[in-house]
Every structure is written in structure tokens, then in C-alpha cells.
Image (cartoon, rainbow, N blue to C red):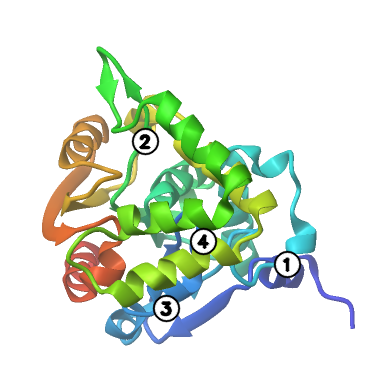
Amino acid sequence: MLMSASQEILHRNNVKVIGNGSTTLILAHGFGCDQNMWRFLTPLLDADFRIVLFDYVGCGKSDLSAYKKQRYQNLAGYAEDVEEILSALNVVDAIFVGHSVSSVIGMLASYKIPERFSKLVMICPSPCFLNLPQDYFGGFEREDLEELINLMDKNYIGWANYLAPLVMGDNNSPELTRELTSSFCSTDPKFAKPFAKATFFSDHRSALDKLEHPTLILQSSNDSLASVDIGHYMQNKIRQSTMEIIQAYGHCLHMTRPSIVADKIRTFCC
């Protein structure tokens, strides 16, 4: 049986819909991850929300044959995934929850289809990871990021073993770090490397003040990828924004502090 265009999109992005609420939450994973990373959060929210989970093309259990190199060389291509998923589900007034780079991806999608968004939640976001003195300090020198990207070609396992502990942070479960390492390693480098370049070398600071939707920024107090200062920078630029600093280590609050994140989302959405 032939699938409709909407069915093809839902299949392409491995879309799953769970939960019983009338309000829709879109959960968008970060670089090197997939929808399984939300499993600590969904049981805390599925009684109150309809939850949409998906994998970007090239990640998780998405349809890898749908990958288009030109489309996914920048974040706008990933934003198209979000736009098409929401259109296929005919979602309006959704609350978009993005982890890390997905915070920016969701923001870009909200400009194209604003009627399908009501609010955004950004978990450990950054509009730019580069240090650009004297104007902005995203945390990384360009040379260091280029070396990190080049390591993907030279030693992909070594790259994953270096980056995963940095992302997950100190004082968290070793099992979570191993899981993240495995997630990085299971993603084909031909998909992971373009996503990494789009993530770490993009600069979307100029787009922040265009965001019209109410936005909640959830910032980890000790995050090697996105500092509290970056959270303050984004809060100052986004007109209708608030920021909550959560005492934690690492870049994955939805995995290490799911109860707190769930409470913050529920309060913000009600």
C-alpha cells in the first residue's frame, strides 16, 4: 500500500505520538542523540500532554535513504524536518522542547510556521559555540572545534570517547556517559559530521530578537558546552523569555535532572 505524503514524513522521521493531554509537546533531541534520550522525561509528562517524539533524518531510526546532503549541511535543513512533521500531524499551538542545538532549530522553524507553535522550551541552548572577541564568547576557539571535527575522520571512536564525557558532565551516572558514547558511535559519520559542523560552526545570534513566542531557557549551572553566561545572553536577546538555572553538571538536564525539568515545563506551560 502506498503511503500518503504525511505518512511518508512520519515514517521518515520515525515519529511516535504518546500521552493523553490536549496540549502537544514536541520533544527534539540534540546532536548525536535520538528520541530515546527523552525516556526519563516522558513518563513524567505523558499524563498531562500529548507528546511527539522523532529522529532527525540521519539520526536514530530515521529513514537514512531520505538523507539529502545539501539540505542537511545547515540547521535550516533540520528545521524543515520539524516544519514538515508538525504539518503532517496538523499540529497547532504546540510547545516545542529542544535540547541543545534543537533549541535553535525549533526557533528557526517557528519563524516559518508560527501558528503551529505557542511556546518554546530551550534546554542548555547556545546560538553560537564560537568565541568571537570582543563581542561574544561561545566557549570554543574555532581552531579547537576544527580539530574536534577533523578527529571524526581520523579516529571516530576516539572522538566519541572524548566528546561524550564532556557533554554528559562530571558527577553523573557512568552508564549515561557510556550510552551517549554508544549513541555517537552508532551514528554513521557521513551523517554525524555535517550535523556537527552545522551545530558547532553556525551563528544564529541575530535571529534571537526575532523570536515572538514565550520562551523558557533551562540552563545547567555547570555546563562545558553552554555556560550560564550564554543563557543570560539569550535571555537578554529573546523578548519574551525567562531563564531557570538548575543546579547540575553537564549538558543533558533532561537525562540527569528529569523531575526538575518536567516540573519547570509543566509550570511554564500551564
Labelled disc at residue 127: 2
Q: Earlier in the sequence, mark 1 or mark 4?
A: 1
Along the line of sight, which residue is nearer the eye, 134 or 180?
Answer: 180
Query: What is the residue that sits farthest to the top in this orientation?
Result: 134
Along the line of sight, which residue is nearer the eye, 108 or 155?
Answer: 155
| Amino acid type indicated by mark 2 | Pro
Q: CA distance from mark 1 to mark 4?
A: 18 Å
Evaluate if marks 2 and 3 touch, with contact meaning CB atoms under 8 Å apart. Answer: no
Q: Secondary structure at mark 1?
A: loop
Residue position for label 1: 63
Displayed quadrant of residue 220? bottom left
Evaluate if marks 1 and 4 touch, with contact meaning CB atoms under 8 Å apart. Answer: no
Residue position for label 4: 184
Mark 2 against mark 3, which lies toward the viewer?
Answer: 2
| Amino acid type indicated by mark 1 | Asp
Evaluate if marks 1 and 3 touch, with contact meaning CB atoms under 8 Å apart. Answer: no
x%, y% of residue 33? 48, 63
Residue position for label 3: 50
Crowd tier of the residue under label 4, counting other residues whose Cα lies within 10 Å: few below 14, some 14–19, many 20 or above = many
Mark 3 against mark 4, which lies toward the viewer?
Answer: 4
Q: CA distance from mark 1 to mark 3?
A: 24 Å
Displayed quadrant of residue 248? bottom left
Mark 2 against mark 4, which lies toward the viewer?
Answer: 4
Q: Earlier in the sequence, mark 3 or mark 4?
A: 3
